[in-house]
Image: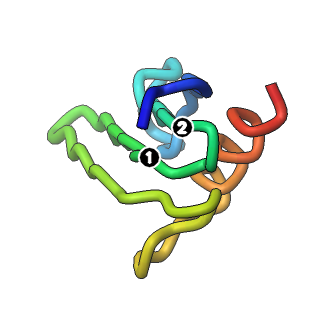
Amino acid sequence: GTIEKMKLIRFNPFDDVGGDQSFILTLLDHDNNGILLTSLHHRSFTRLYAKPIKRGEGDNITLSKEEKSAILKAINR
């Protein structure tokens, strides 16, 4: 499918790191299928997660509250 809905959310998941260096990028098609990329940035590490999305929900994978919010914002744009 073609990407029709996108949303980029920047946030700070760690109390001891300043700035909103972490992000969630949601890319969805017309049927709300696609991927979600989450990057968690800390002083000593950066983690990147790619999660499949099917019909606006995690496809057999747990989503954080921030990831769920990013999906809803992409869908409701």
Q: Which residue is mark 2?
A: 29
Q: Mark 2 is on which residue type?
A: Asp
Question: Looking at the image, which is closer to me, 35 or 45?
Answer: 35
Q: Mark 1 is on which residue type?
A: Gly
Q: Residue at x 47, y 27 (%)?
A: 3
Q: Quadrant of the C terminus?
A: top right
Question: Looking at the image, which is closer to me, 54 or 72?
Answer: 54
Relative placement, left or right, of 12 versus 36 is right
Q: Residue at x 51, y 51 (%)?
A: 33
Q: Could you tell me residue 11's position as x and y percent?
A: 57, 31
At mark 1, the secondary structure is strand
In the rendered image of this protein, does residue 44 appear above or below residue 33? above
> How far apart, in angstroms, are the residues tagged by discs 2 and 1?
6 Å
Direction bottom: furthest residue: 60
Q: Which residue is mark 1?
A: 34
Checking the image for residue 11, the label placed there is: none
